[in-house]
Amino acid sequence: MIEYIRDGKEIYRRSFATIRAEAGLDELPSDVAGVAVRMIHACGMVDLVDDLAFSSGVVGVARDALAAGAPVLCDAEMVAAGVTRRRLPAANEILCTLSDPRVPELARQLETTRSAAAMELWRGRLDGAVVAIGNAPTCLFRLLELIEEGAGTPAAVLGIPVGFIGAVESKQALEEHPGCPEYLVVHGRRGGSAMTVAAINAIASEEE
Amino acid sequence: MIEYIRDGKEIYRRSFATIRAEAGLDELPSDVAGVAVRMIHACGMVDLVDDLAFSSGVVGVARDALAAGAPVLCDAEMVAAGVTRRRLPAANEILCTLSDPRVPELARQLETTRSAAAMELWRGRLDGAVVAIGNAPTCLFRLLELIEEGAGTPAAVLGIPVGFIGAVESKQALEEHPGCPEYLVVHGRRGGSAMTVAAINAIASEEE
């Protein structure tokens, strides 16, 4: 018989205690620290905190937007799939348009990635939304263009794309953009759907 | 106008070139190196390769199993959601039982996590399957118990759970178990659905 902890609540409790003991959360505002704990839990890396950057109101503003019924606009199906529906305060819509049949043609017309082209289908939904970008750097760049075009301004942006081409630069561009709404980013190449989902789930409910 | 690369194929090409230049892939068998490239692409960390461990036949055996129509049994909805269906060689079933309505009661009866309890519904499907565990360490422990019980032996196991409680130990237990089938693991706390999906997608098709 293999010995291991089988109690899900106890696993969470011990995991979060380990994270709080090891990660340097003390310098974070308490609401951001709560989000950081879940993000670290999703990736297994306590040094993630060194790459976190955020505007001071991001958690409060995103939380208020969700409470008021704002949709969560996601760049990837994995992000949409990971959101824990019962944590959402207003049965909020979780929208990912990447698989929409119009997207391949939009990508050809706009000469961009399918991920960025899929955001054309966010028009009319962008204003006041919570945007969660956990995969494609081109989506974060495209978001700034949409804001510049006046297509709407989200309440908050979780900018956590991952990778080697554009990830570093797109997160910098978001932070430095004059039209940037409340934001949370992970600097550098790290990012991805799992930590993005963890951030949404933490913002959606303060329950650990 | 923000300058960034908008050509998806070019982004992939440059990303994979960067990974091949920076990651120490030379010591890996070429089939495992191809899988490692996609896993690194999904997490942004070239040092992932230092934590990779695998049996020599894992990629070939998993690839043959998929070609023969084996299902992919996943521990998390995010893993199932991320598999690129058009890469699969035999329209393989991607099965995640975590949301099955019977699972909460099974978890109570078996006094285990919902993730591990959901694997009761894998009985009869386990033998010859490709198992992809990208979230819960308890699933990897439970898999070894199911193999011990004679519930079946998968063709190959991608053991990539993440976290602080049980992740390290469950991956060690898999490797050291006498009944362990072909396997690929990421040692340590790192893991998660994104890199697990990347491994499945790389095994499913050699197309970069």
Image (tube, coloured by chain):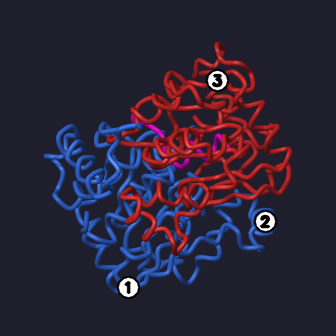
Chain colours: A red, B blue
Residue type pointed to by label 2: Pro
Coordinates of residue B56 in the picture (x, y in percent): 23, 61
Asked whether residue B168 appears in the rendered view, the answer is no
| Front one among A177 and B124 | A177
Residue at 67%, 49% (x, y): give it: A126
Where on the picture, by quarter, is residue B206? Answer: bottom left
For the residue labelled by badge 2, is the local secondary structure a helix, a strand or a loop? Answer: helix
Callout in the foreground (2, 1): 1
Asked whether residue A57 appears in the rendered view, the answer is yes
Local crowd size for mark 3, using a 10 Å CA cut-off: few (<14), some (14–19), many (≥20): some
Residue type pointed to by label 1: Ala
For the residue labelled by badge 1, is the local secondary structure a helix, a strand or a loop? Answer: loop
Local crowd size for mark 2, using a 10 Å CA cut-off: few (<14), some (14–19), many (≥20): some
**Relative to A27, does residue A58 appear above or below in the rendering?**
below
Q: Is residue B83 left or right of residue B37?
A: right
Q: Is residue A195 magenta?
A: yes
- What residue would you read off at disc 1? B90
Residue type pointed to by label 3: Ser
The range drawn in magenta is: A189-200
- What residue would you read off at disc 3? A55
Residue at 59%, 61% (x, y): give it: A121
Callout in the foreground (2, 3): 3
Coordinates of residue A21 in the picture (x, y in percent): 63, 21
Q: Quadrant of the C terminus of chain B?
A: bottom left
Q: CA distance from mark 2 to mark 3?
A: 39 Å
Q: Are marks 1 and 3 on the same chain?
A: no
- What residue would you read off at disc 2? B104
**Relative to A33, does residue B15 appear above or below in the rendering?**
below
